[in-house]
Image: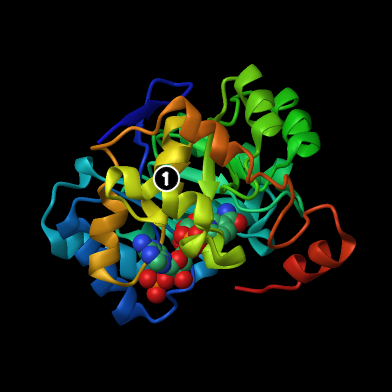
Amino acid sequence: MKYVKLLNGVEMPILGFGVYQIPDLEECERVVLEAIEVGYRSIDTAQVYGNEEAVGNAIKKSRVDRKEFFVTTKVWISNSGYEKAKASIEESLKKLQTDYIDLLLIHQPFGDYYGTYRAMEEYYKAGKLRAIGVSNFYPDRFVDIVNFVEIKPMINQVETHVFNQQIIPQEIMKEYGTQIESWGPFAEGKNNLFTNETLVEIGKKYDKTAAQVALRYLIQRDIVVIPKTVKKDRMIQNFSVFDFELSGDDMKEILKLDKKESLFLSHVAPETVKFLINTKL
Ligand SMILES: NC(=O)c1ccc[n+]([C@@H]2O[C@H](COP(=O)([O-])OP(=O)(O)OC[C@H]3O[C@@H](n4cnc5c(N)ncnc54)[C@H](OP(=O)(O)O)[C@@H]3O)[C@@H](O)[C@H]2O)c1
């Protein structure tokens, strides 16, 4: 496993496992246990995914030392604000059945997220959070928050895949020492990513799938990735991306796939903001 070093020196695996859209607790517990068997130690959940408890159960049942894990969760909009965020951190700790969270993120830049961030700084100083950061903070909101908080966000988790590569936003994050993390590294299969000709052809040279090339590309750009799958063979496949290296020419070819646009939701569109703030836990 390769690691990235966050602003405060904490090391985070560059490859983790995401559990979005696995709301069934039994299924989520099973897949996280399988992912741990495969070798994943970084698990990405969120309050709004409704499965923190299943992640906590799987970690407990795995009998792997808690210290080996890197657990991320995220505070949802309806828990924003200093007091509500603190209560929600306590709830997340309880559901995850742990004394500390490795990385806590503000899930969306909406609501009283400055209040949320102050609560996070307090928990960070108390040693209950090993790292703190944000998610879906596109350049304008990112530059704002990074300039008005005491402890700079160590991570910004944003939509990042071969069709939306975040080249400029990554440079802006770098200016402040914030590590970029990709959500949706496969764009959830949109745009036929898994059969994309460029990725398939490059993959043939290394005996790798389009999925593996897509992950490897992001890893070579020093982007943390957290692919999701409920299938064990795919967990193995997505984990096997450290035994080959894309050439400079491959990297240039894949760069051409960048459309510099979201395939999901534009975070600056009022409809998106309305939709997200109406999404309750
Ligand atoms: N911060 C945010 O706002 C935010 C938003 C979205 C996601 N996330 C995080 O990022 C993680 C990853 O993103 P995501 O779950 O949205 O999407 P993703 O990882 O880009 O794609 C997941 C999809 O790809 C399929 N898949 C996985 N590996 C495959 C392979 N090797 N070959 C073919 N198909 C494969 C999965 O199907 P099967 O499961 O059927 O295999 C699933 O449909 C999430 O789980 C979550 O932790 C965060």
Q: Residue at x 75, y 73 (%)?
A: 278
Q: Is residue 39 above or below residue 128?
A: below
- Residue 142: percent from the left, percent from the top? 72, 34
Q: Looking at the image, which residue is at 42% across and 36% down? A: 219
Q: Residue at image x 61%, y 60%?
A: 76
Do we see residue 266 in this rendering?
yes
Q: Is mark 1 within 8 Å of ligand 1?
A: no
In which quadrant is the N terminus drawn? Answer: top left
Q: Identity of the amino acid at label 1?
A: Ile
Left or right relative to 70: residue 58:
left
Q: Is residue 237 above or below residue 31?
A: above
Crowding near the residue tagged with mark 1, few <14, some 14–19, many ≥20 C-alpha atoms within 10 Å: many
Left or right of 166? Residue 202 is left
Q: Name the residue under label 1.
A: 202
State the residue in front, 44 or 79.
44
Which image quarter is the C terminus in? bottom right
Q: Where is residue 164 in the image (x, y as percent from the top left)?
A: 65, 47
- Seen at 39% across and 33% down, the residue is 246
Q: Which of 21 and 72 is in front in this view?
A: 21
